[in-house]
Image (cartoon, grey):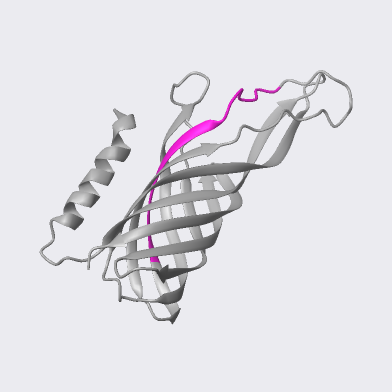
């Protein structure tokens, strides 16, 4: 049941947007790539626990619904993503005495995310080239073990803030790029960073 949440949410947002009397907003495709911090806990032969912090890549893509006119400085965004988080690497025992006891995933983690956010224009013409402040808030609502296809129960909350710019290369089309600081929360905070590249079709 939980696995159907993402497409249902996106369909609801898109339907609500397209059903409004005013022809405004837009639809877009987006790709993302970045880094996130992950942690492993493991034990040596004496039973002592260690924590291992790693920075691992993540990549993905998705769709977005844009709320607002193309000449507005403030645009609302609702996004849905499919993401792939690279699996952590097996740590080495700091004492140099193997073996260690650690459970490391055999493959990457598949993640379904939804976020809402804004692009706030701060410099330039919104109908041509404009620099903006970007912010997003959302959550990983589906996490799947790539080796089994079963739920991994590793859902997390995601907050992002950064800068970006967009450019209208045609009357109803624009491209944009963002660079953001990303902070995940699941039991503890995990910092990271992401880049976004997207193209939008604006209705107005």
Quarter of the picture containing the N terminus is: top left
Q: Quadrant of residue 42?
A: top right
Q: Quadrant of residue 126?
A: bottom left
Q: Residue furthest left?
A: 21
Quarter of the picture containing the C terminus is: bottom left
Eyeballing the image, is 118 above or below 114? Answer: below
- Give the x, y percent position of residue 30: 42, 51
What residue sits 72% from the left and 37% below the top?
Answer: 52
Q: Residue furthest bottom?
A: 124
Q: Which residues are magenta?
A: 102-118
Eyeballing the image, is 119 above or below 60? Answer: below
Q: Is residue 96 left or right of residue 106?
A: right
Q: Is residue 6 left or right of residue 49?
A: left
Eyeballing the image, is 50 above or below 116? Answer: above
What residue sits 21% from the left and 46% below the top?
Answer: 12
**Magenta stretch containing residue 136, yes or no?**
no
- The residue lying toward the viewer, choosing from 118 and 99, is 118
- The residue lying toward the viewer, choosing from 140 and 87, is 87
- Give the x, y percent position of residue 141: 39, 39
- Give the x, y percent position of residue 202: 28, 64
Q: Residue furthest right?
A: 96
What residue sits 30% from the left and 60% below the top?
Answer: 201
Q: How many marks?
A: 0
- Give the x, y percent position of residue 162: 52, 65
Q: Is residue 3 left or right of residue 51?
A: left
Q: Residue furthest front?
A: 170
Q: Quadrant of residue 74?
A: bottom left
């Amino acid at each position: 049941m939980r696995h159907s949440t993402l497409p249902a949410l996106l369909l609801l947002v898109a339907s609500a947007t397209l059903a409004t009397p005013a022809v405004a907003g837009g639809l877009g495709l987006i790709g993302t790539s970045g880094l996130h911090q992950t942690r492993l806990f493991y034990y040596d032969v004496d039973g002592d626990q260690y924590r291992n912090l790693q920075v691992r890549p993540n990549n993905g893509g998705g769709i977005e619904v844009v709320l607002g006119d193309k000449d507005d400085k403030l645009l609302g965004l609702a996004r849905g993503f499919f993401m792939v988080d690279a699996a952590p690497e097996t740590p080495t025992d700091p004492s140099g005495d193997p073996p260690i006891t650690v459970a490391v995933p055999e493959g990457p983690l598949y993640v379904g995310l939804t976020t809402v956010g804004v692009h706030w224009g701060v410099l330039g013409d919104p109908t041509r080239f404009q620099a903006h402040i970007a912010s997003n808030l959302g959550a990983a609502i589906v996490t799947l073990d790539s080796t089994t296809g079963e739920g991994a129960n590793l859902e997390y909350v995601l907050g992002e803030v950064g800068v970006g710019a967009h450019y209208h290369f045609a009357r109803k089309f624009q491209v944009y790029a963002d660079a953001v600081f990303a902070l995940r929360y699941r039991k503890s905070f995990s910092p990271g960073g992401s880049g976004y590249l997207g193209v939008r079709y604006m209705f107005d």
